[in-house]
Amino acid sequence: MAGRLLPPQILTSATQKIRLADFTTGRSELQPEHRDWLEQTVHHLTPYDQFWVDIVGFASKLGPAGGGNDPEASSAFNRQLSYDRANSVARYMEKCSNRVTSRIREFSAHGSDDYSAPASDNRSAERAVEVHIYMVPVPPPPPPNVDPLPPLPGGRRYGSWAIAAPASVTESVIPGAVAAANIIVFRCHERNNETRAYICPAGGPGYSFAPGGGKIMTIIKAILGRLNYSGMSFTDVTAITPFNFRDLEGATCMVASGGGAGIYGSQLCYVSVYGKVWYREANGSPFIATKDFVKNANCSGNDVTYGVGGSAVGGPLIGLQ
Amino acid sequence: MRAALVLLVLCGCSREVPRLATTDPVATPTAPVREDAGHASPAAASAPILAARNVAHTTLAGVRVNTTLPEGWKLLAAESDEATGLVAFGPDDASGAATTAFLDGSQIARMPGSLAQAQAQALARHECPGPNDCSVLGAEALPGGGFLVTVRASQDLLVQSWRAVTADHPVRCGFDAPSRTKNGSPASWLGDPNALARVRAEGEGICRSVAAPP
């Protein structure tokens, strides 16, 4: 059934684009050809880190069965129908890869208002959903005939970031527990690499040990025993839920680290951040909820410290600027 | 002393219910007051004595909506944009992993056609990819029109409601209570039936209360 996979009518620069047509009249379930295309495309996308998706739903002019000739009722019915069809596509893509959720840039329902035809028109090409996938790190501007969704409070959120954990101070409070202050630096690729530093005062399970002995070693221990410096080495991350610098204020940061050195060595370090943020579900509905921003971003590297230790601590991020 | 208290109570009865957050220029944001405010600080004592409903007055894309919030909650101004119809509420200290509620009166808010559709929309979340990932704790049609659905996911409890505040303006209400804490340690309340019931009642109370001003 070649008529179910058509060239798109919306002109964009998307790398992958299609018009999934011939939805059953009045229904929003995907056809087998739609599922096949979405599955293949999403599985092909998965290895890539950066992509953006636009999903636009359509409906033919034919209104609800038994709905009479009320054009407004037909228009409202078809808008809802096109919304449901677009939602079916979004949900299926999300089922193929949960990374799709945070990459949907535009989600809209055009109903049957985009073309002129008699009220009884029911052409299969209009019972459709268009999918446009951009393989770029920064979302492109919306195509001219896609209705933008209302902006979320708090400004635009970003998906492409880099994180560094250049330094920390750790103190054993009681055996098995530590208090720590980690410096975490965030760089936003989509804001001209704007960079901001945060401190994360935190507590949690941990252990550290720095052997003493001799005057020099005691001085080194006093200076470096609690301090860890690994330099400004950034790791690129794609946000699980897009966020901005404002969302980071007060967000919870968890740092799991371990390692050791006799002044110069190496450490393992993983940073996770979550907090409340406005976001959209796959169907475009806005939500504010506690979501993961990044999870286990690998900030490991060489460091300057004295002693061995490991900890998993969590606390709020506080901006240093 | 007792007579003075009675007088204070009577005076309190005649006062307007304090407003929390509003676009009404004559109203002043006022913290909710406990019944024992007579024993509190002088500043608190000057407020109404009777426990007041903590009502947030908002205007969502031009439509006025009242929401009754739990004590200690307020409009989160930095997370709200009344012009586009999206506002958020939360406890005074709503940083990090915090319970939040929101109203969506934006142009894309739509009333589900049936309770089944409302339930399907409530489950259309990233946290609920499979049929067994989330459980519907309650789904009901609201008196006067609209729906309310409560969903439990692995890491949070979400309540959603849809109300037709005016004939052509549905407002979606959401309430999210995360199980995670501000210092990263796991919270256990989702597994405690009493705590779950309390949080659920709080969320459902907020979303049931969404209404046009009388």
Image (cartoon, coloured by chain):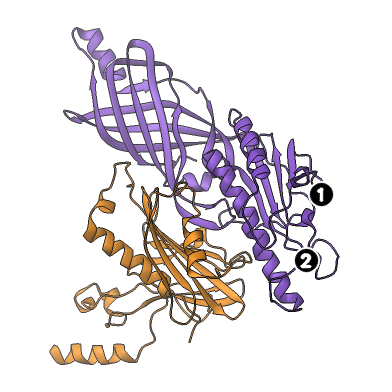
Q: Please give the letter of the chain rendered in orange.
A: B
Rendered image: mark on residue A61: 2
Chain of residue at mark 1: A
Chain for colour purple: A
* Among numbered discs 1 and 2, the one appearing first in the sequence: 1
Q: Position of residue A165 (x, y in %)?
A: 44, 28
- Marks 1/2: CA distance? 17 Å
Q: Residue at x 31, y 82 (%)?
A: B48
Q: Nearer the viewer, residue A221 or A243?
A: A243
* Residue A312 seen in the figure: yes
The residue at the point 36 percent across, 48 percent down is B155
User: Which residue is identified by label 1?
Assistant: A9
- What SS does tag 1 mark? loop
Instruction: Identify the residue at horizontal 46%, vertical 71% (top origin).
Output: B147
The part of the image, by quadrant, that contains residue A318 is top left
On screen, residue A145 versus residue A26, left or right, reads right
Q: Residues within 10 Å of mark 2 (few under 14, many from 20)?
A: many
Q: Amino acid at mark 1?
A: Gln
Task: Look at label 2 and name its amino acid.
Answer: Lys
Q: Residues within 10 Å of mark 1 (few under 14, many from 20)?
A: few
Q: Secondary structure at mark 2?
A: loop
Task: Tell me the quadrant of the picture where the N terminus of chain B can be found.
Answer: bottom left
Q: Residue A183 location, x and y as percent?
A: 42, 32
Residue A187 point in image, percent of width and height? 56, 34
Q: Determine if residue A102 is in view.
A: no
Please, is residue B35 above or below residue B121 in the view? below
Q: Which disc number belongs to residue B126? A: none
Question: Which of A154/A106 is in front?
Answer: A106
Chain of the residue under label 2 = A
